[in-house]
Image (cartoon, grey):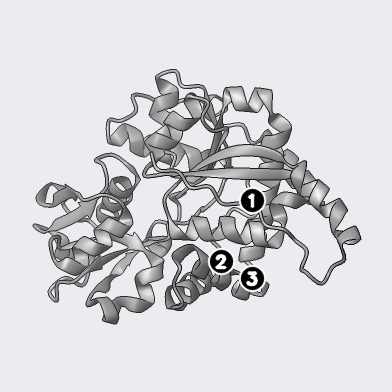
Amino acid sequence: MASLHIDRRRLLVGACCLGAMAPLRAKADSAKRIDVVATQGVTGLTLDEMARAQGFYEEFGIAPNLLQVSDSAKCIAALLSGTCKLCAWSGFNQLLPAIERGGKIKILAGSLSLPSLAIYSGKKDIHEAKDLAGRSIGIGAPGAVLHQMTILLLKKKGVDTSKISFRNVGSNADILKAVIAGTIDAGLSDVDAFDQQERYGIHALTDGLLWQEIPEYTNQATYASDTAIQSDRDGVVRMLAAYAKTYRFVSSPASQDAFIKAWRKITSSADAKDAVTQWSWIQKYQPYAVNLVLSDDQINLVQKLNIDFAVQKQMLPVDQIADMSLARDALKLLG
């Protein structure tokens, strides 16, 4: 597992006198460290950096230490081992069979509620989902979230999935590279490539925008082990409050400059085109769980898909899977 530690940022500028800075330094130094795990992704890291720059974590007296991993299975492992207390944002379809097998973890809140993905292709004869019959599509691990979302869309469009060759090529970033290289015919990747299609020599399928075609599918959630909830409920609640404030901020027009600045820092790129695309998409579609709480229907849809994919044996009671009381407590901290 590769880790990423992002240092806490001070709120005051150099123009402040030392006497004025001392109380805020003390507040930052006394903040509770919470080890957090999340799946790799530029947008998630951008939100984290933006939250630090805006002082949202310090406001709630917390200092998250972020561990970045390749997939949700590693997020689950980090929680169960006690390496981390909280998974910030990740798909949760693999979490449910882990709970079925006895894993003591609970979904606590939503994060990215809408799928921020589209199906892209570099083939000139592929324009719609129906054109994918008999072709190759890139996915992540079989049964994992990218595979599930692809199948859900194809079935919705009446495509016979038995005639498609699914290839595990890795993350959605890896899928995009494979589409550009032409080693696969199509595959899901993030919305930040949407305005760069001509540059990459690819195009999104006309009916392949997942945020429009399968908005019922909850992309990512926040979850924690039962042990972390019991041992540090207050710290977890404060983390959720900071995330809610971040989601609300990034969903507002006032966040543009902060989002682009954070994006540039994370990517070390002066080119803001992808950042503007992502930010504009957020403004238009409002995909983040600004009120945190997930419904039973959102959770059960993923359970049903898991059963269809034979990665989960039976429907579990929602109270065995989720505990939204922490999200509701977090919302109270926002006033």
Q: Amino acid at mark 3?
A: Ser
Q: Position of residue 176 (x, y in %)?
A: 27, 63
**Residue at image coords 43%, 50%:** 217
Could you say which is closer to the camera, residue 237 or residue 28? 28
Question: Would you say the residues marked 1 and 2 are in contact, meaning their CB atoms lie under 8 Å apart?
Answer: no
Where's the N terminus, which quadrant?
Answer: top left
Residue at label 1? 243
Checking the image for residue 262, the label placed there is 2
Where disc 2 sits, the SS reads helix
Q: Position of residue 76 (x, y in %)?
A: 44, 32
Where disc 1 sits, the SS reads helix
Could you say which is closer to the camera, residue 4 or residue 291? 4
Dot 1 crowding, Cα within 10 Å, few <14, some 14–19, many 20+: many
Label located before the other in sequence (1 or 2) = 1
Q: Amino acid at mark 2?
A: Ala
**Residue at image coords 54%, 36%:** 223
Could you say which is closer to the camera, residue 62 or residue 136? 62
Where disc 3 sits, the SS reads helix
Q: Position of residue 123 (x, y in %)?
A: 14, 72
Residue at label 3? 255
